[in-house]
Image (cartoon, rainbow, N blue to C red):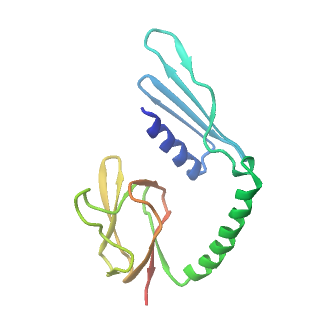
Amino acid sequence: MDLKEIQNLIKFVAKSGASEVKLETGDVKITIRTGSDEKETTIVQQVPVGGQQQMPQMPAQQPAQQQSPAPQQETEAPQKESKESAEDDSKYITVKSPIIGTFYRKPSPDKPTFAEVGDTVKEGDVLCIIEAMKLFNEIESEVSGKIVKVLVEDSSPVEFDQPLFLVDPS
């Protein structure tokens, strides 16, 4: 398991809201614990020679308050904007993930995306694919309308009931 996979796992666990996750694969044991304010990760790797090597605990995310007062002021403006955009988004229908997995906008890397912002979709049109346990599940639109916003980045993990698209039904 490489560092990028571990970082993606930490991000996924942090978003999921789980308090503790333990993963054992071969010679690697990983325990991820999330607290109320701090997220910490303990990674234990077993060496086949018989000795155990433990890496120091590292924070999954660094709180923004530790940097400087300027970033904190910047974070207040997006919160106001997000409240306004939430009010605007209420007139749209949200297409949510029916399963946990990895979100893909294309059927394969060399093919075009299923749905772009501005595209008109009909009920039953394929919007994306979610891979779960090596199975690729086509997610179809349950409504007809125009794609207003894609809420998830390509190749990123999604949770059950996580919003994927905003559709304008008018």
Residue drawn at x 29%, y 75% is: 125
Query: x and y percent of residue 77 in the render?
Result: 69, 69
User: Which one is nearer the viewer's eye here, 3 or 161?
Assistant: 3
Q: Is residue 132 left or right of residue 96?
A: left
Q: In which quarter of the image is residue 106?
A: bottom left
Outermost residue toward the bottom in this view: 170
Residue 59 lies, with reference to residue 164, above or below; the image says: above
Outermost residue toward the left in this view: 110
Q: In which quarter of the image is the N terminus?
A: top left
Outermost residue toward the right in this view: 69
Query: x and y percent of residue 62 in the render?
Result: 66, 44
Q: Is residue 80 left or right of residue 17?
A: right
Query: x and y percent of residue 61 in the render?
Result: 62, 44
Residue drawn at x 39%, y 82% is: 146
Q: In which quarter of the image is residue 20?
A: top right
Number of marks drawn: 0
Residue drawn at x 65%, y 68% is: 78
Q: Quadrant of the C terminus?
A: bottom left
Q: Is residue 28 left or right of residue 87?
A: left
User: Which one is nearer the viewer's eye here, 103 or 19?
Assistant: 103
